[in-house]
Image (cartoon, rainbow, N blue to C red):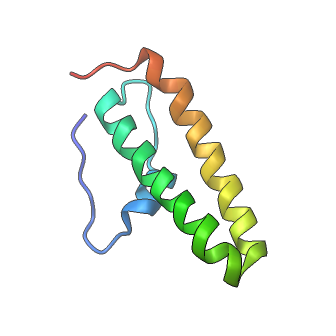
């Protein structure tokens, strides 16, 4: 799968919204997982103190994405 990332788009938004197809490579899944984990770190350390309600919603959003990625990783292959 060839990836085209638009300039000026936050990589975290890609990690949270990029369509995950059945043929998504394990390499891409690992990159997305790393980006989501970085975002979770930000949420729990910074945003949670300044806007706890938004942080809670974003943490749930990130957790849902991590569940999807984790479910796909065992069967994913690199081309």
On the image, the x and y values in percent for residue 9 come to 35, 70
Image point 21% across, 40% down: which residue?
A: 2
Horizontal side of 70 relative to 50 (left or right) equals: left
Image point 49% across, 51% down: which residue?
A: 37
Q: Residue furthest top?
A: 75
On the image, the x and y values in percent for residue 52 come to 75, 75
Q: Evaluate whether residue 25 shows in this view.
A: no
Horizontal side of 35 relative to 78 (left or right) equals: right
Residue in the foreground of this view, choosing between 72 and 18: 72
Horizontal side of 9 relative to 16 (left or right) equals: left
On the image, the x and y values in percent for residue 18 come to 44, 49
Q: Is residue 71 above or below residue 34?
A: above
Image point 37% across, 61% down: which residue?
A: 11
Image point 41% across, 53% down: which residue?
A: 35
Residue in the foreground of this view, choosing between 46 and 66: 46
Q: Is residue 61 above or below residue 42?
A: above
Q: Is residue 24 above or below residue 63?
A: above
């Amino acid at each position: 799968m060839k990836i085209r990332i638009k300039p000026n788009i936050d990589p975290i938004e890609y990690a949270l919204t990029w369509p995950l197809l059945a043929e998504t490579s394990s390499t891409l899944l690992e990159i997305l997982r790393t980006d989501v984990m970085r975002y979770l770190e930000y949420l729990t350390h910074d945003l949670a103190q300044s806007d706890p309600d938004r942080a809670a919603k974003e943490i749930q959003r990130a957790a849902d994405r991590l569940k999807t990625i984790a479910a796909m990783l065992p069967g994913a292959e690199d081309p």
